[in-house]
Image (tube, grey):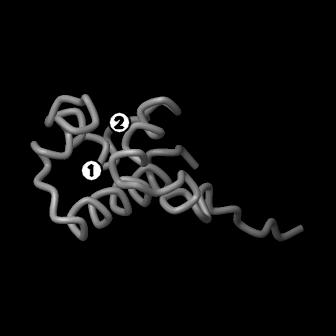
Amino acid sequence: MPLKNVDLLTLGSRIRKARMSKGFSQKGFAMKCGLDRSYLGGVERGDRNLTFSILCGICDGLNCDIAAVTRGIPNLRTLVP
């Protein structure tokens, strides 16, 4: 299954929820992280396969570790023989 279908959507949704829970606008948070607002929007929609360094910057801006937004990703499915 392509990463976009589940995992990037899940990651983007978690980032959006964390950003909003901290009271950041998308534009303000993007500036804080050194990103363009439209790029951050793409991440939050699951349209962008972000790099590790960008994920680190986002997590730094959220004041959380990477595990907080990536726990359970990828969603490992049990293989049935």
Question: Where's residue 31, x and y in %?
Answer: 17, 35
Q: Tell me what residue is drawn at x 28 percent, y 50 percent.
A: 44
| 53 to 76, vertically: above or below | above
Q: Please, which residue is most extreme toward the right here?
A: 81
Q: Which residue is mark 1?
A: 45
Total numbered labels placed on residues in the image: 2
Q: Are marks 2 and 1 in contact (CB under 8 Å)?
A: yes
Name the side, left or right, on which 10 lies relative to 16: right
Tell me the CA gap for discs 2 and 1: 8 Å
Which amino acid type corresponds to the residue marked 2 in the rendered image?
Answer: Arg
Q: Tell me what residue is drawn at x 35 percent, y 54 percent.
A: 62
Residue 73 vs residue 79, the one in the foreground = 73
Query: In which image quadrant can residue 80 be found?
Result: bottom right
Please tell me whether mark 1 sits on a helix, a strand or a loop.
Answer: helix
Name the side, left or right, on which 73 lies relative to 4: right
Query: In which image quadrant can residue 32 be found?
Result: top left
Question: Where's residue 50, x and y in %?
Answer: 42, 34
Residue 29 vs residue 80, the one in the foreground = 29
